Each structure stands twice: as structure tokens, then as C-alpha cells.
Amino acid sequence: QVQLVESGGGLVQAGGSLRLSCAVSGSIFSINDMGWYRQAPGKQRELVAAITRVGSTKHADSVKGRFTISRDYTSNTVFLQMNSLKPEDAGVYYCNADVVDPRGIRGIWGQGTQVTVSS
């Protein structure tokens, strides 16, 4: 069974940093795009950053210059380095990956990790 396991969330003061990790486990052939989304209470889930199979990245305007997405192809892991955190960055962060496995191409979601930023 293919799963995404996230880690790295927590409580941090405004201006601080966190690094999120998301590892893909299970039997897969390859991984296409990977991304991080977040959802604040009462708001819709939004894209924070994404990275393609060849390493092209995009970041939401609200996090440009502060967050950086990267991936390790050997370990099938995607990271989100978050610096200069603001209270409005708080929420549940979800990892997403488009995996290619015996069932075809599927989008898989992680369980989410909570990020809390105190002012």
C-alpha cells in the first residue's frame, strides 16, 4: 500500500523556522509532481509549493522568499523549508504526490501535520 508519511510540524514563534518532510512508502514505479498544501481553520486548502519530476518548482506568492520546496529522489522524500514564519502561515500542512504504481497514476495525500505560529 502506498503511503505518504509527514513529519516536522510543531509550534514555533513568529520569525522562526520549521522543516517539513514527507516520505513516500510502498511499491511504486515512479513519482511525478509533489507538493505541499495547507489548510487553516475555516479556509479552503491551498497550494503552498510544488515540485515537478525534473525539479522545477513553484511557490505561492505569500511564501515566496521564505519557503523552499525540494525533493530527494533516492529516498522519495519531499521537503518544505519554512523560514521567517508568520502567524498567518499556521494550519495543517498536507503533502501530495502523483505516484505511478501497478494501479496506474494516482494522487496520494499525507495525513497532515500541524504548524502553529505564535505571535
Image (tube, rainbow, N blue to C red):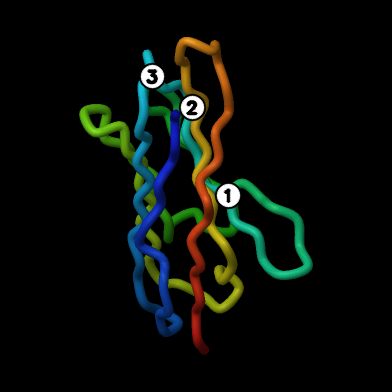
Q: Is mark 2 on a helix, strand or loop?
A: strand
Q: Is mark 1 on a helix, strand or loop?
A: strand
Distance of mark 3 from mark 2, alpha carbons?
14 Å
x, y percent for residue 4: 43, 41
Residue drawn at (21%, 28%) of the image: 74
Kindly identify the amino acid type of the residue bearing the numbered disc 2.
Answer: Asp
Residue drawn at (43%, 79%) of the image: 11
- Which residue is label 3 attached to? 28
- Which residue is label 1 attached to? 37
Residue drawn at (41%, 22%) of the image: 31
x, y percent for residue 44: 75, 55
Q: Is mark 3 on a helix, strand or loop?
A: loop
Q: Is 73 left, or right, of 69 in this rendering? A: left
- Which residue is label 2 attached to? 33
Residues packed near mark 2 inside 10 Å, few (<14), some (14 to 19) or many (20 plus): some
Tell me the quadrant of the picture where the N terminus can be found.
Answer: top left
